[in-house]
Image (cartoon, helix red, strand yellow):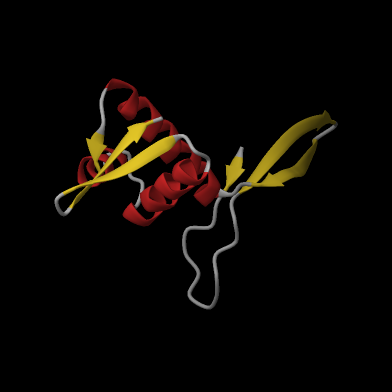
Amino acid sequence: MVLSQLKNRDGELFKPLALAIDDLGNNKTEVTVLEEIDVEADKRKQARDIIRKALEEKPLFREDIIVMVKAEEISERTCNEALKSLLDAGELVKSQDGHKVRYSQK
């Protein structure tokens, strides 16, 4: 089970928590916090996976990649971070076509 805070008027939201709930019998239940879930890291990984899969077929312009990633409810900022990490890892090649940026797999 995941516990998420949706609103907070007075401060920052806490990160979602993965919980385990165990029935111990005798009307007792134990709730254990397993880990904090880093939603942003999950979104960056999802964005990288979408980009890799899309670029297997053909090179794409940055704008087209952003549209695909946003369709999965991932922000443009997260998409840009994913593109940068793939470039830094040597998985992608970036080129200019006039004013447009094109990405392809290495």
Query: Between 54 and 22, which is closer to the camera in this rendering?
Result: 54
Residue at screen point 55% across, 70% down: 12
In the rendered image, the vertical position of residue 15 relative to residue 24, given as above or below: below
Q: Is residue 26 left or right of residue 62?
A: right
Q: Is residue 97 left or right of residue 95?
A: left
Question: Count of labels shown?
Answer: 0
The quarter of the image holding the C terminus is top left
Residue 2: x %, y % from top left: 59, 42
Residue at far bottom of view:
10
Provide residue 80's location: percent of width, then percent of height.
37, 52
Q: Is residue 34 left or right of residue 42?
A: right
Q: Can I make out residue 43 in this image?
A: no
Residue in the image at 48% along x and 75% along y: 9
Quadrant placement of the N terminus: top right
Give the residue at x 44% y 52%.
Answer: 81
Residue 74 drawn at (x, y percent)? 36, 46
Q: Is residue 6 visible?
A: yes
Q: Residue furthest top?
A: 57
Q: Quadrant of residue 18?
A: top right
Q: Which is more toward the observer, 14 or 60?
A: 60
In the foreground, 46 or 13: 46
